[in-house]
Image (tube, helix red, strand yellow):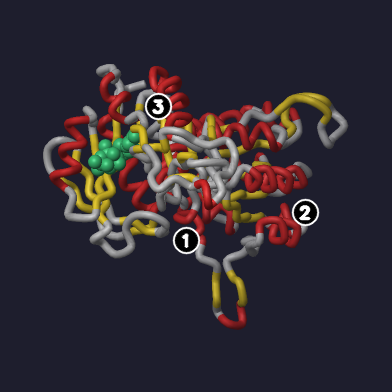
Amino acid sequence: MVHGRKILLGVTGSIAAFKAVFLARELMRRGAEVRVVMTAAATEFVGPLTFATLTGHRVYSDFTEDADQGTWTNHVDLGLWADLFLVAPATAETLAAFASGACSNFLQAVHLSSRCEVMVAPAMDLDMFAHAATQKNLLTLRERGVLVVEPGSGALASGLEGKGRMEEPDRIADAVDAHFLARAPWRGQRVLITAGPTHEPIDAVRFIGNRSSGKMGVALAAEWAKQGAEVTLLLGPTSIAPPAGCAEVVRFETAEELNALAQARWPEADWGIAAAAVADVRPAFAHKEKVHRADLPAAIPLAPTPDILAQWGASKRTNQRLVGFALETDEGRASAESKFHRKQLDCIVLNTLLDDGAGFQTDTNKVSIYAGANWHTFELKSKAAVAADLVAFLHPYCYPS
Ligand code: CTP
């Protein structure tokens, strides 16, 4: 769930600041974009260059960037940029400042101007943490919606033992992950997606295929995973890499293989999304060896392949939803509506090769969506943006999980 999120990491003046380096690295390993804000005290423990090198972005710690030039750092922009403001380590001083609304350094100004949620990972000595004032500040922050990653117990920098050491970076990253999952609109929904072309063998080297790249299906899998769905991606022969965050990715070559995978998984799915360009026919007989030119037949007998989507439709339970795709070479609405009814769909996504930039191989697409009433037409966009539109469009059709 951390993948693709913008996390503003606030580092304050505690010896645990060194652990924030590992935290930044762990968040980035999970796919987050990380920017760092430090207090002056934090820079005494870890140099800003460490974070700047690690994240590839300058570190923010002061209002002025270049006093001579009159340039200043916009704390408002940083606050608006972030999906989460994570302060780790958060000292007793910073917690008190957050609770009272103080604005005496750059990090505190970012706190006051941020619109995203705030998470703090306190780090201090055990008596400071247990002090009534600190506990009152934490209560105030919690009541205000600030998320608190409780410190762990163990040896402290003072030589004492007790509760107060900042939680380990992995566990804080898990808390960030859980935070995004809890708010993800598609959490609990199991989405089964077919994507890519099929290759139907003629012999050991030749096949009947099509021009599908699988880009649209892969973009949909990425978007649904980002929105918290449990995604199973059945991906055909394509060089496009499957996205991060899928619960399961299974590769297939032929329509028959796809059908076996798709039907086995369908009973467990809440949604079936048929983005694959499945061959309608296959050679009735596939030679195991290469057939030499002189032996090639004048005609290749063909046999129909299973219609995967139609089978999903025929066995659909009332709480399952089905989305089909129609790629047409004409205006296409009548044909798409016929598929919508014939295959018992809840929604069909139409793209037509009449539109420049739509269809196979491209990085863009232009779609119209029909869910049984009106057609909704979208602009030409990147396939990632089309996927975001489609996933947002479908969300009201979810059953509560
Ligand atoms: N589909 C499928 N299995 C097939 C053929 C198609 O699951 N054997 C799915 C596609 O993934 C797509 C939808 O059905 O979501 C429509 O595909 P399309 O090829 O346009 O439909 P066909 O039923 O094959 O109709 P036609 O070729 O006559 O346009």
Q: Amino acid at mark 3?
A: Gln
Q: Three-letter amino acid code at disc 2?
A: Val
* Res. 335 in view: yes
Q: Position of residue 312 (x, y in %)?
A: 32, 24
In terms of secondary structure, where does tag 3 sit?
loop
Label 1 CB sits under 8 Å from any ligand 1 atom: no
In the rendered view, does 395 fall on the left or right side of 43? left
Q: Residue at x 66, y 39 (%)?
A: 92
Report if the CB atoms under discs 2 and 3 are less than 8 Å apart: no
Nearest to the observer: residue 10 or residue 144: 10
Residue receiving disc 2: 46
Q: Which residue is mark 3?
A: 189
Quadrant of the rendered image holding ligand 1: top left
SS for tag 1?
helix
List the residue tagged with mark 1. Answer: 77
- For the residues labelled 2 and 1, the Cα–Cα distance comes to 25 Å
What is the CA distance from the residue labelled 3 to the residue labelled 1?
Answer: 34 Å
Which residue corresponds to the image point at 45% horizontal and 24% vertical from the top-left?
Answer: 260
- Foreground pick, 62 / 264: 264
Residue 137 shows in the view: no
Q: Tell me which label, 3 or 1, sits earlier in the chain.
A: 1
Say whether residue 223 is left or right of residue 91.
left
Amino acid type, mark 1: Asp
Q: Is the Cβ of the residue at disc 3 closer than 8 Å to that at disc 1?
A: no
